[in-house]
Image: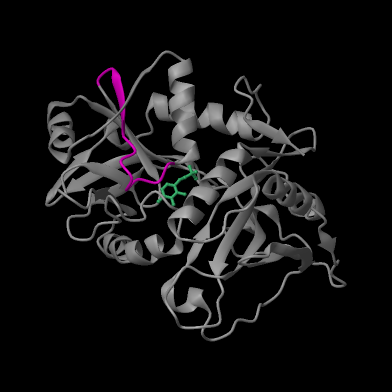
Amino acid sequence: MKIKITKTTTPGTMPSEDQLGFGKVFTDHMFIMDYEAGKGWYDPRIVPFGRISLHPASTVLHYGAEIFEGLKAYRREDGGVQLFRPMENIKRMNNSAERMSLPAIDEQDMLEILETFVKTEEKWVPRSFGTSLYLRPFTFGNDESLGVHAVKSATFMLIASPSGSYYAEGINPVKIMIESEDVRTVRGGTGYAKCGGNYAASTRAGEKAMKKGYSQVLWLDGVERKYIEEVGAMNVMFKIGGEIVTPKLTGSILPGITRKSCIEVLKSKGYTVSERLLSLDELVEAMKSGTLEEAWGCGTAAVVSPIGQLAVGEDEYEINDGKIGAVTQELYDVLTGIQWGKIEDPFGWVYKL
Ligand SMILES: *Cc1c(COP(=O)(O)O)cnc(C)c1O
């Protein structure tokens, strides 16, 4: 793939690393390429970061044809930069594309795009542990017509944002409430795809939870409203006695790469991990009898996020005295250790640039 690079004449400067936050500052450039049915992807280019112009009838603005990914570039202590399991994001993006009738991108081309772009923006990869350059690839339907059908034109872009440490103030367990009205998705729907529409439909519940003093909601399945699915926009895991349980991928759950990595780390350390249905009733029983030892969300942004309190209707249950548990801490240490290159990677997950 021949990527044309046009450098900015007004390069920016990196803010102080303890003031980065998440997704607010963007790098000097962005990657764009266009797609037409019959022609395929064309004109791959890196250009100065800036606004884009869309036709007011552009498909994405009306029918929500949009998918995205989220991954990070990490700075190792030796100064080098690496990605974490990028091929997993690439394959998932193509699965999302298939679900939303958007065009897929050749895996090797996508890897080359990520690599070329991160190398161009290298100075924007922050240096302190916990900070990273967040990468956001996305594809959207861009037909200039209001007809409803699989798109004939699309645009792929990649933007990047230097991001601060998620746990700048230490790892504090969060308060979560069960969501009993809204559901995130249903089986047969788009739950397994990383598409913007899922987020649009789930922010209401999150906002409602915040007003009540919780950080996020625990989603139940959309069919029976009985089984645990995810927490906010993260996958979820529980330690119940000697078993670590995470909801199995039924189609309405996003197949997280952090989830997959947690399962593989836990199994390598001899833990019993079950991917199975977990009902809210079973969880409440475990909280009442004291066998629920730990609960945590997992995703690229936070790595792991311990749950210290869970509200089921009017009842509030404290988990592990509101403190981070030993397994959650171990997962955090191993995954961040591998990602930031502090410990050896026995799994072959890091991709050095
Ligand atoms: C992205 C995402 C996750 C986490 O996936 P990772 O690959 O671990 O970052 C979980 N749930 C939802 C709904 C997501 O969009």
Residues 27 and 71: in front is 71
Magenta span main SS: loop
Residues 121 and 257: in front is 257
| Image location of residue 284, percent across then percent down | 14, 36
Q: Is residue 249 left or right of residue 342?
A: left
Q: Does the rendering let one see residue 31?
A: no
| Image location of residue 243, percent across then percent down | 29, 21
Membership of 250 in magenta stretch: yes
Q: Quadrant of the C terminus?
A: top right
Residue lying at the far front of the rendered structure: 38
Q: Does the rendering let one see residue 199?
A: yes
Residue 65 position (above or below residue 81): below
Labels in figure, total: 0
| Image location of residue 278, percent across then percent down | 22, 34
Membership of 181 in magenta stretch: no
Q: Is residue 187 left or right of residue 125?
A: left
At horizontal 69% and vertical 45% (from top left) the residue drawn is 111
Residue 295 found in image quarter: top left
